[in-house]
Amino acid sequence: MPQLGETVSEGKITKWFKSAGDVVKPGDNLFEIETDKVSMEVPSIAAGTLTEIRVQTGAVALVGAVVAVIAGEGGATASAPAAAAAAPPPSAPKAPPATFAAVPQARVPQPSGPLDPFFEVRTPSRNFGPAMTAGGASVTPLARRLAGENDIDLSRVSGSGPHGRIVAADVEKALSSGAGRGAPATAAGMSATQVKALYQGVEFDEVPLDGMRSTIARRLVEAKQTIPHFYLTADVTMDALLKIREEANAGAPKEGPAAYKLSVNDFVIKALALALQRVPAANAVWAGDRILRFKHSDVGVAVAIEGGLLTPVVRNAESKPLSAISNEMRDLAARAKEKKLKPAEYQGGASAISNLGMYGVREFSAIINPPHATILAVGASQRRPVEAADGSVKFVSQMTVTLSCDHRVVDGALGAELLAAFKALVESPVRMLV
C-alpha cells in the first residue's frame, strides 16, 4: 500500500484491475485505492506474474502493508501469510521501495525506532485543523469516514491501534457486531439517523460519501470556521484582453506540439501569477505560527470532477508564456477529471482561482483552500453600460472578480493592492506578453 500524503495512514482497495495469475509489466494499473484525500489507480513497478492478492476489494490496508505478490521470472510464488513471511538474509539484495511524488516540505522530527504505521507527520503548513478524536482517542481519517457512512458512534468503539487509536478495522468490527449504532449529533450537525427521521414517508435516495466528498466537507467547514475571511470585489474591463486573445488564437498553430488555443482563464492565471510577484507580501500562506512567503507564483485552479473537485497547480506561472499555461492547464484538467493526478500536482500552491463564468455566474465569493491566504472567484464576462469620460454612456465587456483573503496574512490594504495589480494586468494585457 503506497504512501499518498504524509497524513494518510491507510487506504481502501476499491477495485483490482488484475487477477492472480495475470502477467504484469511496469506501468500496468494493479488496483484502485481510496483514502480520505483522493481516489487513484496504483501501477505496478515490477514485471512478472501476479501470484497472490492478499487484500481483497473493499478491504482496508495500512500504508506499507503487502497487498499483493508479484513473482519475477524464475521467482517462487509467495503464498504464506504476510505475518509468517521470513525475513531475507542480510546478504540478500534488497529491492528499492516504490517511490511516489511528494511535495517538498520542512524536515520534522522522526521516531527513533521503526516507523509506526499509525504515525502521522503534521507540519504547520499542512495542519488543516484539529486532530480528529472520539472520546479522547484519536481516529484515522478513513475510520472517521466509515463510521459516518454507517452511523457508528465512535465514542462506543474500542481502538486497537497504538495508544487506543481507532482504525478502520475497528469500525468494520463494530459494524459486523452491531455495536456502536446510532451516532449522536455533533458540532458538525445532525447525524444521519436524526436527519432521516425528519423525512419519514418521503422517498429519497441515499448517496454514501466517498473519501473525496468527506474531505471536501470537513476541510471547507474547518476553513470557514477557522479562517477570518474578508472579501474584495472589482469590475474588470475585458475588451483589450478579448481582442488580443482573438488575434492570438487566429494566428496560433492548429496542429503539432506547438498548437494552442488560449482561454480567458489562461489570461486570469497569468495575471494573478504576475500580480503576486508585484505584491510579494500577498504571495504567502498561513503556517500555524508563521507565514511562508514564496519566490515563485504557484497558482491552483479549481476543476470540477464527478463527486467533487480538485485544484491542480500551475507551478512558476509567472515565468511561463500563455501558450504553455494553456496546454499545461488543459492536460491537468483532463487528468483531474480522470482522477489520474499525482499528489504533487494538486498539493501546495500560493493562491487559487475558482472560475464559474462559463456557467453564466455574474459574481460569487469562494472559500479559501487552506493553507492558502487568498482565492480569486471569477465571474462571467458581460456587456455592461458604463459612463465614459465625457459623461456619455457606452457598452464595454466587464468581468466581476472577488478576492477572498485570510486576514491573518493579508490585510485589507494589501488585498486591495493585489486586486488592483490583477485588474491593471487584465485591462492592459500586453504587459503579460513582455
Image: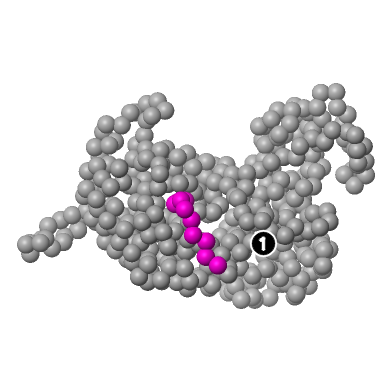
Give the colour scheme shown. one colour
The part of the chain drawn in magenta is: 290-301
Please indicate whether residue 275 sits to the left or right of residue 250 in the image: right
> Does 142 appear above or below 346?
below
Please state which of residues 145 and 114 is positioned toward the viewer in this rendering.
Answer: 114
Tell me the quarter of the image containing the C terminus. top left
**Front in this rendered view, residue 223 or 115:** 115
Label 1 element class: loop
The question of residue 398 being in magenta is answered with no
Give, as a three-letter code, the residue at label 1.
Arg
Residue 298 is one of the magenta-drawn residues: yes
Residue, x 45% and y 46% (percent of image)?
Answer: 316
Instruction: Give left or right: position of 22 versus 383.
Output: right
From this viewpoint, is residue 178 visible?
no
- From where the camera sits, is residue 78 visible? yes
Question: What residue is disc 1 on?
Answer: 122
Q: At 63% from the left edge and 56% from the top edge, which residue is drawn?
A: 106
Residue pictured at 34% horizontal, 40% vertical: 262
Farthest top residue in view: 74
